[in-house]
Amino acid sequence: MEESELRELIIHSLEQQGFRLEGSRILPPADPSKETLRRLHAMAVRSRREQAGKSLQPHESRLLGCFASGGEVQPAKIKPRLVKVKRRSQEEILFRYACLHWSIPVSSGYGRRLRFLVIDEQNHKLMGLFGLGDPVFSLAPRDRWVGWDKEGRRARLHHVLDAFVLGSVPPYSLLLCGKLIALLVASDEVREAFRQKYGGRPSLISERTSDGSLALITTTSALGRSSLYNRLSWQNRAIYQRVGFTRGTGDFHFNNGIYQHLWSYAVQHCQPTAKQEKWGKGFRNRRETVRKCLASLGLPPGYLSNLVQREIFVAPLAANCREFLRGEETRLDYYEQPAESLFQWFRERWLLPRAQRNGRFREFDPKTLTMWKGEG
């Protein structure tokens, strides 16, 4: 693609998504409602679905059978079970398919990864899912909360994971089960799964061998402020704490089908940042690819600042989480948060009262989740 053609394509794409171009920067729509923010992501979501359709469409009929109809859910008999997702498994196919129904494009996660499905044992249907991966290196609100300087963060960040996707699927989402999924993320079972998978394994880049201690989980809201984590407590202690907002930088607005054009152009015309050989070759990440491409095309670097902020939450897993992450203490004083106890708390606090107040979940038909026409 010619340089002028690609430049015009980028500008047209940003305007089509709903961004306002003002000089060297782009601005989101003046209306900050969640529906407006969903529309900003709509093109990227459609692009992801089109790409995934090549491999997932043949499985869609079977995958839809993994979702419960409203009549298959009996709130008083719900019994969640955590299922680890393994690579190249049927669970991974279901995980990928369910993520395509999120209102924003879901990342695949970075570096170390733990992915879980939450299955209802009463009917063997999918309730929700979550994925944990390596956190971004620099996140000012998180780092201020911990009390990190650069060296402390570099030395202890491997004790932190980020929930890059987290939520429930219908009809369970109508029963506030997103809150249950958020609770399970902080469960003892997840912490133990991390220890078993990564304890004793050296990091590829730092070559430091981890003891598998997980101290903190972070996550960000999908659309501005979030109510999912409101009053989400256990034994009179908030599981999640608000620590601030992202700066509104990122590349989601280039994930709508034009990123491949940017990557092709960058490979031909841009120089990747020099890295150690063991990190691999090429561009560091998608953001670097976009940044280098914009510069080469003569477009402002401000186009990477979309100003769509997301709320940041932290979930400490131990009473001395911050002291440990600062290197002041060597052992974690873990909270006891077994998944079964967390569910029983959720059941009495949110699930059963919601089921009594609102019976809309009974009307849900999994066929409404169909994404591709034709035979699945």
Image (cartoon, rainbow, N blue to C red):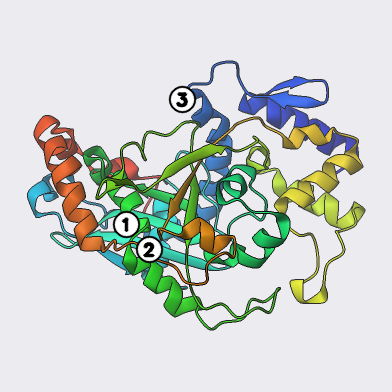
The residue at which mark 3 appears reads as: 35
- Name the kind of residue labelled 1 in the image: Leu
The residue at which mark 1 appears reads as: 184
- Name the kind of residue labelled 2 in the image: Phe
In front of the other: 116 or 10: 116
Q: Residue 159 sits in which quadrant?
A: bottom right
Q: Residue 30 sits in which quadrant?
A: top right
Residue at 40 percent of width and 68 percent of height: 191
Residue at 82 percent of width and 20 percent of height: 23
Q: Sequence order check: which comes first, mark 3 or mark 2? A: 3
Task: Please provide percent x and percent y for residue 174.
Answer: 24, 38
The residue at which mark 2 appears reads as: 116
Q: CA distance from mark 1 to mark 2?
A: 10 Å
Task: Please provide percent x and percent y for residue 302.
Answer: 79, 32
Is any part of residue 86 visible from this angle? no
Q: Residue 19 sits in which quadrant?
A: top right
Q: Are marks 1 and 2 in contact (CB under 8 Å)?
A: yes
In front of the other: 303 or 318: 318
Indicate the secondary structure of the residue bearing disc 2.
strand
In front of the other: 94 or 22: 22
Looking at the image, residue 87 lies above or below residue 328: below
| 359 lies left or right of 10 | left
Label 1 CA crowd tier, 10 Å (few <14, some 14–19, many 20+): many
Indicate the secondary structure of the residue bearing disc 3.
helix
Q: Sequence order check: which comes first, mark 1 or mark 2? A: 2
Closer mark to the observer between disc 1 and disc 2: 1
Q: Are marks 3 and 2 in contact (CB under 8 Å)?
A: no
Task: Please provide percent x and percent y for residue 26.
Answer: 73, 26
Closer mark to the observer between disc 1 and disc 3: 1
